[in-house]
Structure formats: structure tokens, C-alpha cells
Image (cartoon, grey):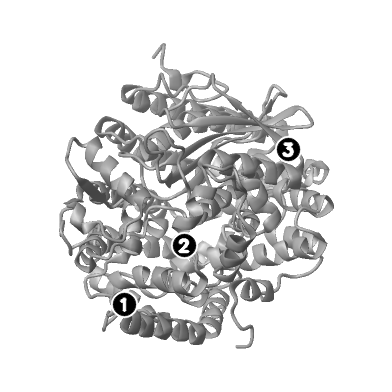
Amino acid sequence: MSGNPLLERHELPPFNAIKPEHIEPAISQLIDAHKKAVDEIVASGQISWNALVKPLEDAGEQLAQAWSPVSHLNSVANSPELREAYQACLPKLSEFSTWMGQHEGLFNAYKALRDSDEFATLDEAQRKSIDNTLRDFRLAGVDLPDADKKRYGAIQTRLSELSNNFANNVLDATQAWHLDIEESQLAGLPESARDILRANAEAKGADGYRVTLDFPSLLPVLTYADDRELRQQVQEAFVTRASDKGPNAGEFDNSEVMAEIVTLRQELAQLLGFATYADLSLATKMADSPQQVLHFLNDLAKRAKPQAEREYAELAHYAKDTLGIDTLESWDSTYAAEKLREDRYAISQEQLRPYFPAPKAIEGLFKVVNRLYGVEFTERTDVAIWNDDVRYFEIRDNGELIAGFYLDLYAREGKRGGAWMDVCRTRLRRVDGTLQHPVAYLTCNFTRPVGNKPALLTHSEVTTLFHEFGHGLHHMLTRQEVAEISGINGVAWDAVELPSQFMENFCWEREGLDLITSHVDTGETLPDDLYQKLLAARNFESAMQMVRQLEFSLFDFRLHHELKQPDSAAIQKMLDNVRDDVSVAPQTSYNRFQHGFAHIFAGGYAAGYYSYKWAEVLSADAYSAFEEAGVFDQGTGQRFRSEILERGGSRDAKELFEAFRGREPSIDPLLRHSGIDSAA
């Protein structure tokens, strides 16, 4: 095992040295070492923070530091060899997690520490981490009879496998489809989109133009292509990914995967004494009950749907009268909406692109964060990376290094779609007393640079960049030194989107845009006439967008609250029922959105997708404090940093919000920001 980089301590992952053959041996060895450490700690009988919690935290961090780069590479540099090694570790890690969660000796040691005199002398973060750990022991089935414990472990192992299968099917289905088109089919597409499609073809040694299902290729076609048949063909391929329909029907089908995932989740919840998986999900969230979540979502839908219906009627009327589209189909909606937006507000994402060169957007992001929180950014070029596109930055506060992050912005083959922040290193105080700084992965799938020009981002892409960086700041600006509640760890899932959605607001402020924009040719910041048009169009079809998100949220929550042993037909029926209740835009019969809904079937949002709207209430209300005091008011910025970002999971999210805002959250700022009448 000598020479295995995953078994060595590193400041940062040695991405240039990690090979697939290193992965399974290293993870197996580290799991065995962690188990041995647990048994030795429990056998010692010493019940104290330093004798129990700290050495366990240290052992856990060794395993986390080996698995983090492996998991990350599986998402951003997927290959058959890496996938095989990654998948071989999933059952091992699942079994280990169950073993830890059901270790009665360890559970009893934590209970003894909780009941000891020392507990009262620990700080707030330490006490919270112990309480969380005891809760998690019970949620892992530590109190179950042996047969139920065994079944719990088997379910968790299978769920880990199924979630990975779901994600692989979506990735493979996305990459399996392409469409080569002629120049005659490009009418309506802006030059930036043509460059992308031409580059797609050249990368594969083909002539002409190639459409793929990656967003930088897909979205311009659906938005701008005048060729209606082309839009329909591309849209059908996208909404049928990994399903029983469409051009690759049955090849990467997630139908049975989804059904088994939901069935096993419901069985798991009942093993633990919960009525449904939705109830189990809420055990670690802000929301008190499924009824509260459903009331929240349905109330928002009731407020938004009348306006959404008016917006859709306007769109259909415009499509018929102006575009000659008698019946507005799903493959027409994005195209017609962009035409209507341009007609009504004289602005488009393509007009804005030249003002958002990626290097300037990143520089501006750093300036916004500096003005809010006083931290500074410097790039390091001596760090091992997984692709030449990747950059690494350090964050300093008054000259002191406090964090770092990798920035991976552009779509490419072997990289799963979407945008996300993930943890590379957690801030904690090691057993030897040294402080480990937090490090984040910040990943997007933006339009790549073409030729010698920098990548030109849309305003929507810039907003996504700010969103993910908000997650990153939550992780990196933490002041906590206990791994369990450091950064985003221990934060209620329905509050974790607060810092990310909060950051999006600065993409709409004049003061923020002056820092972010610089025309690629002239260096000019965004002109005021374009800014006023951007603001005027901000809430264009906002109610339609809201009911769309509520459709996803209600489908997810009701799926995990109402269906116990569904097949794929029952899952489809549930989605259809939700659409009947809240949707205003008809869908095609072949639409299989759920087959690609990785957030809930391969991510952490099962019975939790409502968190986006729940946290948006918090973020809009938090931002209203800046609207009252001044967008870059330093006092308000420092309070947000100290009360929200630095606290991690050391206190309940509701308490943290109320400490910052001085009151309970209000839904009114969200409705105001969305341009929706607050009267229900």
C-alpha cells in the first residue's frame, strides 16, 4: 500500500497522482482503521470530549479526505475505470456508516458524555454536536432489534447503489444523444450559440454543427431556433432522458430505479418509527411537520397561480398573433417567451453576454464579497487540478489565510450537468491543536470559451455563479472548529439555501453590476438603459417560474408522503396530479421529467426540494435588511457574516435567522421580489 496518495496526509488532494487502482484499497484500509479506532476508544472507557469526540473526529477526517477527491472526480472527470472503482466503494461506505450509527458501545459513550458534569462546561458548538450525534444514532437505528438493524443496513446499501445508478443513467443518457444539423437549421441562433455547436462538432471530428443535451448547447436551441421541428426534436430528447420514451427509449431507463428508491425509503422510515419518509426527512429540518410543509407550498401556489395563468394566457396569445403558432406547445414556450421578453423590454440574454466576460464576472464577485465581508482573494497556480480549466484561490482575512476553493466553470464531456458546491476540507481543530482551513469545490457548467475570446456568460449564468459561491461562503467563512457543525455541516437542509439565494440579489443591484460587468471589447460597465431594461424584465413570467418550482416541490414531498410502494406508473400519476393542481403550462404525454430529477433521486433533496422555496423566504427577508441599511452596508454585512455564515450548524437555523433579523421571517419580501401580489 506504500505510495498510495489517498493514504497520505495532504494539505490539498493530489489530483494528479490519484489513479483508479488506488481507490478501493485505500478506502478499505481507512475504514478498517476507523473501526479499530472506534473499538479502542470505546474499550478505554474514557468519557470526555478529548478522549471520545476528538480522536473519532480525526479518524473520520482521514477517511473524508480520501473519499472527497474520489467522489468529486466521479462527478467532474467520469471514466469507466473511475466509475468502477467508485462504485466498488459504495457498499463498503454504506456498511461502515450503518456500523457506526448502530454501534451501541459508542452510542452509550456519547450518552454518558451528555449526562456527565463535563457537558455543562463545553461550549455551545460542542454541546450541539453531541446532541446532533445522539439524534443521528437514533435515526441510524441504534435502538432497533437486531433483525431490523440488519434490514436497515441492507436498505442503506441498496439505496446508495440505486442513487448512483440513477445519476449514471442520467449522465450516460445525456451524453448518448446528439444531433448534427445543417447551417440552414441555424436561423434565429445568435453567433455565440453557433460557435458552441460548431465547436461541439469539431471536438468529435465532425463537420457542421452538433447539438447535445448539455445546457450551453441545448438552451440556445430551445430559446432562439426558428426551426420549430428542431426545437421539438431537441426538447423531446431532453425531457425523455433516462426513461422509457424518446430517441433512446429504455436504454438508460430510470423507471424501476425510481420506484425501488421510493419503496425502500418508505420501508426505512417505518423501521425507524416514522409514518412516512417525509416525516423522517423533517427530523433534521426547520419545518415541524409534513402538514406545515404542504400548507406552505399550497399557500404559495394559491397566491401565484392566478398570476401564472394570466402570464401563460398572454404568452399563448402572443405566440398565436405575433409568431403564427396557433397552439403553444412545450417546445415553443421558451422560444416564444424570449421573443415576448425582447418585444416587451427590448432586452435579451444575448445582448447582455458581452458585458459578462467570465474573468470580469469572477473578479467582480470577489469585489462584492470583499465589500460585504472584508475578505480578499488570491490565486494559486501550484495546486494539483483535474482539468486545465480549473483554478484555485485562497481567501484571506486581514492577511490571514482562512479558506480556499477550486473553481471549475465550464461544461465538458465526463462532467455531470448542473452547478453545485461540495466540501473538500472541513474547518476543524485537529487532535494536535492545529487548525485545518476549509476548502470547497465550486462547480458549474457554463458556456466554454471559443477561440481566443474569454467565455461570455449570460446574466442567468452569473446569477448561478453567485448562488453557488453563497454556498461556498457558508462553508468557508465558518468560525466553527468542530467538524459536525462546521460550515454547512449540521445546518438544517431547509435553511442551507439561505446564503446561496441571498447572494443572487447582488446580480440585480446597480452597485453590484458595476463591479461585475465590463464589455468584452470596450470595457464599459452595463449602460443604464440596459440596466433599467434588465430590472423591468426581472419578474417577467415570475409567477410561472414560481409555480414550476412549486410543482417540483409538491411532487417530491407528496411522493415521499403518500406513496408507499409505487411503480413508475404511480409516480407518473402523482406528478400528473400535482401538475393538474398547480401547473399552468401543459406538458406532452412523453415528458419524463422525473427520470432526470437527480436532486431527489441521486442528491440530498428527497422530501426536501421544498427547501428552495422555504429558504427563499429566509433569503429575501435577510436581504431586505440590506435594502433598508444600504446594499453594501458594512455593519449589516458583518452581522450577516457573524450571525449566519460563521455559525454553521452550532445553533438552530431559526434562532440564527432571528438573531440576525430581530424577528421571525416574513413571506412578504419574497412575494415583493417576485412581483407577486401578496394578497391570497
Q: Are marks 3 and 2 in contact (CB under 8 Å)?
A: no
Q: In the rendered image, which quarter is residue 25 located in?
A: top left
Mark 2 crowd level (few <14, some 14–19, many ≥20, 10 Å Cα): some
Mark 1 crowd level (few <14, some 14–19, many ≥20, 10 Å Cα): few
- Residue 163 spot, x, y in % from top left: 34, 51
459 or 303, nearer to the observer: 459
Q: Residue at x 61, y 39 (%)?
A: 363
Mark 3 crowd level (few <14, some 14–19, many ≥20, 10 Å Cα): many
| Residue 375, label in figure | 3
Q: Residue at x 59, y 73 (%)?
A: 674
User: In terms of secondary structure, where does tag 1 sit?
Assistant: helix
Looking at marks 1 and 2 on the same chain, the residue that comes earlier in the sequence is marked by: 1
Q: Amino acid at mark 2?
A: Ser
The residue labelled by disc 2 is 348
Q: Amino acid at mark 1?
A: Leu
User: In terms of secondary structure, where does tag 3 sit?
Assistant: strand
Q: Residue furthest top?
A: 2
Q: Which quarter of the rendered picture does the N terminus lie within?
A: top left
User: In terms of secondary structure, where does tag 2 sit?
Assistant: loop
Q: Is residue 488 visible?
A: no
Looking at marks 1 and 3 on the same chain, the residue that comes earlier in the sequence is marked by: 1
Q: Amino acid at mark 3?
A: Val
Q: Is residue 112 visible?
A: yes
Looking at marks 3 and 2 on the same chain, the residue that comes earlier in the sequence is marked by: 2
Q: Are marks 1 and 2 in contact (CB under 8 Å)?
A: no
The residue labelled by disc 1 is 323
